[in-house]
C-alpha cells in the first residue's frame, strides 16, 4: 500500500512547475513537503490529488488514480487546499459533513459511519463545541480547524493538506500537527494507518512532528529523508538562503531560521 | 439541534410548501375573471366543464410548472455560481429563450412543427448561458456575472425589438410582445403538452447536479477532490436550466425574478445547503407564481395585467435591495 508518483511533471504553458518527479510514500507516515516560495510544493500536492493535469502517473496500491472513478478516487485521496472559500454560511457540522459526500449515495441520509466519521473528525480538531455555530461567524483559526475536520471526515487513506497551520495560533499549530500525526498512526479505534502529506513552512514543526521530509526547490525534490538528514544546515542554507539555528531540546530537534544569507 | 433534525427540516418545509401550493392551485381553479372583474366558481353548470378544462386547468398547471421551473433553476444557478443574485432572468437565460421563440415565430418555422417553438427557446437560452460563461468565466465575481447578464439581456431584448420592429402585421407584433411580457392567460392544454417534454429532462438534469452543488460550497478544487467534477456540474445545471427555462418561456414568455426571490426567501427556513434548497424552491416558485396569477385575476376591472409585468414590478425593487446590501453572506 503506497502512494507512488512516477515521472510526474506539471507544466503551465511554457513554464515547468514540477520537473519529472518520482517518489514513493508509505502509509503510517506524516510527510512534510517543504521548500521556499515558488518551489512547486502546492503544484506537486495538487498533482498527487489529481487536480492538475500532469505527465506521468500517480498510483495508489498499484492502481493509477486516473483509472478509478471519481468517487472511488475521492474516497482514497482527500485534499485540503490552503484557505479554501466557504461560499454558503452553513452550520459547522453540516460543513464538516460535506467530507462524507464521496461516501453517500444520491439523496441518501447520513449512515452510522457518516455520523461517526464527522464526530471523530470534529473531536480530533477540537471543533465539537462549534457544531451549531455558523461558519461565517468563526475566527480565522476556528475556520481553518473546521475545514481540516471536513478533510479528515473523508477518512481517506491518503490526506494531502496545503499549509494546514499557516492561520493558526501556536496552541492550535501544535495541536493540529499532533492531530495529523495521530491520524497517520491509526490511533483512533480500529482506524488503519494512513498517509498524510502536508505542505509546511514551519521548519521547526516539520522537524519535530514529521516522519519524513521532502525538500523541494525549483520544481524538483532536492532532499528526501528523515528530518535530521533532510533538514541539515547545508540544505537549509542552499535552498532557503537562510542561516539556521539547529539544536536539540528535550530530545527533539529544534530548527529555527536565524538570519537571511546575503547573496 | 441534532443532525437528523437539521437535515429533515428542508423536507418539512417542502411538505408545507406542497400543501400550500395545492391550496393555491385549488384557488386558481375557482377564481376567474370577466369584463366586470373577478368571478368565483364556474358560472353555469353547462359551462363549468369547459371553463375548467379549457381555461383554468391549463393556466393553473402552467403556473405550477413554470413557477417551479423558475424557482428550481434559480436555486441551482445560485448554487453553481455561488452567488445569491443569480437567476434565469437576470442571467439572460429567459430573454435568450424568448428571443429563440420569437425567431422561430418570426420566420414562420412554427408551422413546420409545433415542437420547434420550445426547441428554439431552449437554443436561445443555451446560447445566452454559454455567452454568460464566456464573458464572466467560471470564477466570475458577482459584479462581473451581473454585468454579463445585463449585456446579454440587452442584446436579446434588442434583437427581439428588431423582430417587433419588422413585424409583418399588428397581429404578429402582439404575438412577439407576448413573449416579452410573459403571461399565463389564454393557454391551453396543448401548451402544457408542448412544454413538459422539454422541462422534465431539464429538471432531471438540474436535480442530478444536487450533490455537485453541495461540493462546490467549498470551491472548485475541493469539489473536484470530493469526486464531483465542477465542469460536469456546470454542464448539468446550464443544460438543465436551458431546457427547463426554454420550455417554460416558449409557452408563457419571460416571467422574471421568481428564481431570485424564492431561494432568497427559503434560505431563512430551509437553510443554505444548495441541494436541500432545490425541492423547496421548486415548490416555492410554483406557489408564488400561482398566487401571483390568482392575484392578477382579483384585480379591479380593466385590461388584465400580464404576469411577467407583475413579477418584474415586485422583483426589481427586491433585486435592488439585495444589490444595495452587497453580496449576501448573512445566515
Image (spheres, coloured by chain):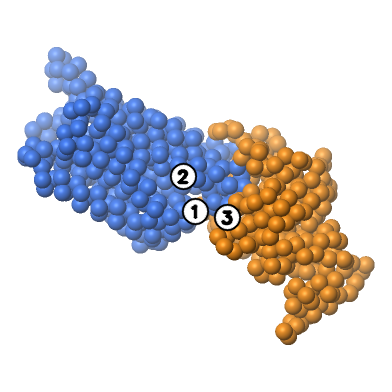
Chain colours: A orange, B blue
Q: Mark 3 packing: few (<14 Cα in 10 Å), some, or many (20+)?
A: many
For label 3, the SS is helix
**Residue at the limit of the structure toward the front, as seen here:** A14
Residue placed at 73% from the left, 65% from the top? Answer: A216
Q: Nearer the viewer, residue A15 or B329?
A: A15
- The chain ID associated with circle 3 is A
Residue placed at 49% from the left, 42% from the top? Answer: B233
- Which residue is the site of mark 3? A135
For label 1, the SS is loop
Which corner quadrant of the image does residue A230 belong to? bottom right
Residue placed at 69% from the left, 67% from the top? Answer: A218
Q: Estimate the x, y position of residue A113 in percent, counting from the top left.
A: 70, 36
The numbered disc on residue B331 is: 1
Q: Are marks 1 and 3 on the same chain?
A: no
Q: Nearer the viewer, residue A136 or B175?
A: B175
Q: Estimate the x, y position of residue A158 in percent, counting from the top left.
A: 73, 47
Precedes in sequence: disc 2 or disc 1: 2
For label 2, the SS is helix
Residue B172 visible at all: yes
Q: Estimate the x, y position of residue B289 in percent, counting from the top left.
A: 30, 38
Q: Nearer the viewer, residue B23 or B196?
A: B196
Task: Compute the Cα span from label 1 to label 3.
Answer: 9 Å
Q: Are marks 2 and 1 on the same chain?
A: yes
Task: Compute the Cα span from label 2 to label 1.
Answer: 25 Å
- Which residue is the site of mark 2? B234
Amino acid at each position: 500500500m503506497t502512494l507512488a508518483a512516477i515521472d510526474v511533471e506539471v507544466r503551465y504553458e511554457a513554464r515547468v512547475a514540477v520537473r519529472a518527479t518520482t517518489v514513493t510514500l508509505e502509509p503510517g507516515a506524516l510527510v512534510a513537503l517543504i521548500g521556499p516560495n515558488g518551489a512547486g510544493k502546492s503544484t506537486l500536492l495538487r498533482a498527487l490529488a489529481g487536480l492538475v493535469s500532469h505527465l506521468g502517473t500517480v498510483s495508489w496500491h498499484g492502481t493509477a488514480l486516473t483509472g478509478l472513478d471519481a468517487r472511488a478516487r475521492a474516497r482514497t485521496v482527500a485534499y485540503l487546499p490552503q484557505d479554501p472559500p466557504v461560499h454558503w454560511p452553513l452550520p459547522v457540522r453540516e460543513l464538516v459533513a460535506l467530507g462524507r459526500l464521496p461516501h453517500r449515495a444520491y439523496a441518501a441520509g447520513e449512515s452510522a459511519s457518516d455520523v461517526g466519521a464527522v464526530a471523530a473528525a470534529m473531536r480530533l480538531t477540537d471543533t465539537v463545541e462549534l457544531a451549531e455555530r455558523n461558519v461565517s461567524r468563526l475566527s480565522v483559526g476556528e475556520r481553518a480547524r473546521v475545514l481540516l475536520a471536513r478533510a479528515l471526515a473523508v477518512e481517506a487513506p491518503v490526506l494531502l493538506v496545503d499549509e494546514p497551520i499557516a492561520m493558526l495560533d501556536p496552541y492550535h499549530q501544535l495541536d493540529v500537527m499532533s492531530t495529523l500525526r495521530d491520524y497517520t498512526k491509526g490511533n483512533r479505534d480500529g482506524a488503519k494507518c494512513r498517509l498524510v502529506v502536508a505542505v509546511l513552512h514551519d521548519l521547526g514543526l516539520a522537524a519535530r512532528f514529521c516522519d519524513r521530509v521532502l525538500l523541494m526547490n525549483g520544481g524538483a525534490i532536492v532532499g528526501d529523508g528523515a528530518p535530521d538528514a533532510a533538514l541539515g544546515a547545508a540544505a537549509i542554507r542552499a535552498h532557503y538562503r537562510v542561516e539556521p539555528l539547529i539544536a536539540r531540546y528535550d530530545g527533539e530537534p529544534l530548527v529555527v531560521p536565524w538570519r537571511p544569507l546575503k547573496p | 439541534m441534532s443532525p437528523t433534525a437539521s437535515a429533515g427540516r428542508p423536507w418539512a418545509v417542502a411538505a408545507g410548501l406542497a400543501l400550500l401550493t395545492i391550496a393555491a392551485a385549488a384557488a386558481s381553479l375557482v377564481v376567474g375573471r370577466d369584463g366586470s372583474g373577478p368571478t368565483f366558481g364556474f358560472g353555469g353548470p353547462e359551462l363549468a366543464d369547459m371553463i375548467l378544462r379549457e381555461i383554468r386547468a391549463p393556466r393553473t398547471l402552467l403556473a405550477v410548472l413554470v413557477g417551479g421551473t423558475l424557482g428550481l433553476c434559480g436555486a441551482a444557478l445560485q448554487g453553481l455560481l455561488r452567488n445569491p443574485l443569480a437567476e434565469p432572468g437576470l442571467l439572460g437565460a429567459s430573454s435568450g429563450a424568448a428571443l429563440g421563440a420569437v425567431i422561430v415565430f418570426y420566420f414562420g418555422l412554427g408551422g413546420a412543427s409545433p415542437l420547434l417553438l420550445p426547441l428554439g427557446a431552449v437554443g436561445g437560452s443555451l446560447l445566452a448561458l454559454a455567452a454568460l460563461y464566456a464573458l464572466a468565466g467560471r470564477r466570475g465575481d458577482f459584479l462581473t456575472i451581473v454585468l454579463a447578464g445585463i449585456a446579454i439581456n440587452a442584446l436579446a431584448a434588442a434583437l427581439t425589438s428588431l423582430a417587433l420592429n419588422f413585424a409583418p402585421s399588428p397581429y404578429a407584433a402582439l404575438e412577439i410582445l407576448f413573449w416579452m411580457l410573459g403571461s399565463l392567460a389564454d393557454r391551453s392544454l396543448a401548451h402544457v403538452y408542448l412544454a413538459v417534454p422539454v422541462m422534465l429532462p431539464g429538471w432531471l438534469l438540474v436535480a442530478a447536479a444536487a450533490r455537485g452543488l453541495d461540493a462546490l460550497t467549498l470551491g472548485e478544487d475541493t469539489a473536484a477532490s470530493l469526486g464531483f467534477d465542477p465542469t460536469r456540474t456546470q454542464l448539468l445545471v446550464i443544460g438543465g436550466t436551458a431546457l427547463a427555462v426554454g420550455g417554460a418561456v416558449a409557452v408563457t414568455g419571460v416571467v422574471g425574478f421568481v428564481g431570485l426571490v424564492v431561494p432568497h426567501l427559503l434560505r431563512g427556513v430551509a437553510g443554505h445547503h444548495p441541494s436541500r434548497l432545490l425541492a423547496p424552491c421548486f415548490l416555492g416558485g410554483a406557489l408564488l407564481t400561482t398566487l401571483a396569477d390568482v392575484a392578477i385575476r382579483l384585480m379591479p376591472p380593466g385590461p388584465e395585467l400580464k404576469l411577467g409585468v407583475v413579477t418584474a414590478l415586485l422583483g426589481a425593487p427586491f433585486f435592488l435591495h439585495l444589490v444595495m446590501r452587497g453580496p449576501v453572506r448573512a445566515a
